Amino acid sequence: MPYLGLDIGGTKIAAAVLDENGAVLLQQRTATRKESYAQFLSDVCRIIAALQGRFSVPLSIGIALPGGVSPLTGLIKNSNILPLNGRPLQQDLQRRLNQRVAIANDANCFTLSEALDGAGKGHRMVFGVTLGTGCGGGLVIDRQVIAGGHGNAAECGHNPLPGYDPARDGPAANCYCGQRNCVESFVSGTGLAERYLSLTGRKATAQDIVALAELGDAAAARQFDRYLDQLARMLATIVNLIDPDVIVFGGGLSNVPALYRDISSRVAAYTFTDRFCTPIVRAVHGDDSGVRGAAWVGKEISSGN
């Protein structure tokens, strides 16, 4: 049975069909329309039906999305695609498609993909961090996603920024989740751009800010240095709590070489250990990690797990 994975983000829906060995049989991307829940649901069903029609055998279905399904209510929670929150997306999809559908947090899917056959392959405990529109985290131990008792494990993006100080971190930030100074508001690509705008009054993408810093722009260099320190504080908290074998970065900012230049020494300054040696590496599968992980999650339910 081929495995269909969908990685649903704020701007695009990536879809891929994998074979048993992880080879990509089919791939496509579609813009995410999120004006209403009904529209979103119809779009996802249409994408799945169109891809299913390309194959003569049934496809298992796995979906990665920001947030996740509450094990208490079965409803979507904590998604930055706001029309999904409080909705029975899994039940609605299964009813319309007449088959089982697995839904998992996008950072968990990313981490699973990298743990199985990516940058974390061969490591027992893999922590994944996505640095893009938002900041997500995932934990895989012995090739299994650890979602926690309530589906909230590894949600590093919505912890308060450790040691927040307006003198070194800039103004306080309100998060869409209702809290203040969430890590995501500082270390996501969006957060970096918003912090730079607050500092300079100029709009720029996260990648452009890093490029300006590399060229010697003082304001960009100052903000990127802040960013790296904030990221290091977040990672040190993860290391102190669970001590993973490897940390894997994904998302748009993971492709920035300057991110890796001295991040290990910065993390070491905040960790409770005599010697910090946890590798911090870039994802092997890049932007495809989320959709690959979703396909593997779908494979699990097709196997009866």
Image (spheres, helix red, strand yellow):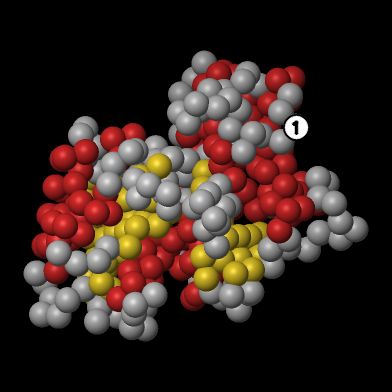
Towards the viewer: 26 or 140? 140
Locate the C terminus by quadrant. bottom left
**Number of numbered discs visible in the structure rendering:** 1
Towards the viewer: 261 or 110? 110
Could you say which quadrant of the image residue 37 lies in? top left
Q: Is residue 13 above or below residue 213?
A: below
Q: Residue at x 62, y 48 (%)?
A: 259
> According to the image, label 1 marks what residue?
163
Specify whether 84 is left or right of 212.
left
Work out which residue is located at the far right of the displayed protein and give it: 274
Q: Is residue 80 above or below residue 30?
A: above
Q: Residue at x 9, y 69 (%)?
A: 53
Work out which residue is located at the far top of the displayed protein and give it: 201
Say what amino acid the circle numbered 1 marks. Gly
Specify whether 275 is left or right of 27.
right
Residue 17: horizontal and vertical position, in percent?
Answer: 26, 71
Q: Residue at x 52, y 43 (%)?
A: 135
Q: Residue at x 52, y 71 (%)?
A: 144
Circle 1: element type: loop
Q: Few, some or many C-alpha atoms within 10 Å of disc 1 (few <14, some 14-19, many ≥20)?
A: few
Q: Can the viewer see residue 217?
A: no
Residue 129: horizontal and vertical position, in percent?
Answer: 56, 53
Residue 123: horizontal and vertical position, in percent?
Answer: 63, 74
Residue 9: horizontal and vertical position, in percent?
Answer: 34, 46
Specify whether 95 is left or right of 157.
left
Q: Is residue 189 above or below residue 137?
A: above
